[in-house]
Amino acid sequence: MKLILLQKVDNLGDEGDVIEVKEGYARNYLLPKKLAFEATKGSLTQIDILKRKRKQREEKELDALRQLQKKVDGMRLEFVRKAGDKGKLYGSVTSKEIAEKIGEILQLELDRKFIDLPEPIKDVGKTEVKLHFGKGIYGSVQVQIIPEESVRPDDSKEVKES
């Protein structure tokens, strides 16, 4: 059965694509969920309209990603964490924390999938973290991990009143 997709469907195609699927899949899934409509001679003329809308939406998304890349690229982030004597953290800084910090600074929600961090940062110091926004748009941020100055109970002097 020939159908025209109304939106992107994984493993089938994008909005405006003409696809051919089995009749049961079309009648039981794609048509009831309004993901596609039957391709007729009249509906084939609507493909151009759908493709133009898709192109405009993709251009807007690309422009928004470029704007985000300009704001984020070169940003310096500081994290204060407890660390041992040899500069190893008692935990780590993850891509989620980096995304949240960028989101706090820019007042927006940044997807952690943009952060290209193969494994969490576990050492004190500077680390350059690469960002991949998709569609060939890249950036990077400097992450500075600062050891937290902890006060040991032995070193603190408490005055007790009697």
Image: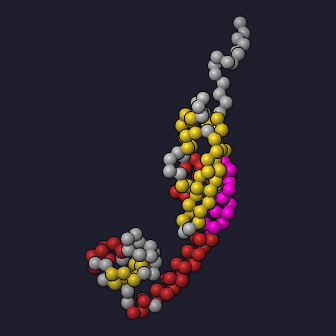
Residue 22 visible in image: yes
When the figure is inspected, residue 69 is found, relative to residue 162, above or below; the finding is below
Quadrant, the C terminus: top right
Point 42% across, 79% down: residue: 5
| Residue 65 lies within the magenta run | yes
State whether residue 100 appears in this view: no
The spot of residue 100 in percent (x, y) is 60, 50
Residue 123 magenta: no
Horizontally, is 127 left or right of 50 in the view? right
Count of numbered circles on the image: 0
Question: Taking 91 as reference, is 9 left or right?
Answer: left
Q: Position of residue 35 (x, y in %)?
A: 41, 75
Asked if 32 appears above or below 50 in the picture, the reply is above
> Residue at position x 28%, y 79% from top?
23
Residue displayed at 40% across by 69% down: 10
Residue interval drawn in magenta:
64-77
Q: Position of residue 73 (x, y in %)?
A: 66, 59
Position of residue 87 relative to residue 69, above or below, is above
Percent across and percent down for residue 37 are 39, 81
Chosen colour scheme: secondary structure
Give the left or right position of residue 109, taking residue 45 as reference: right
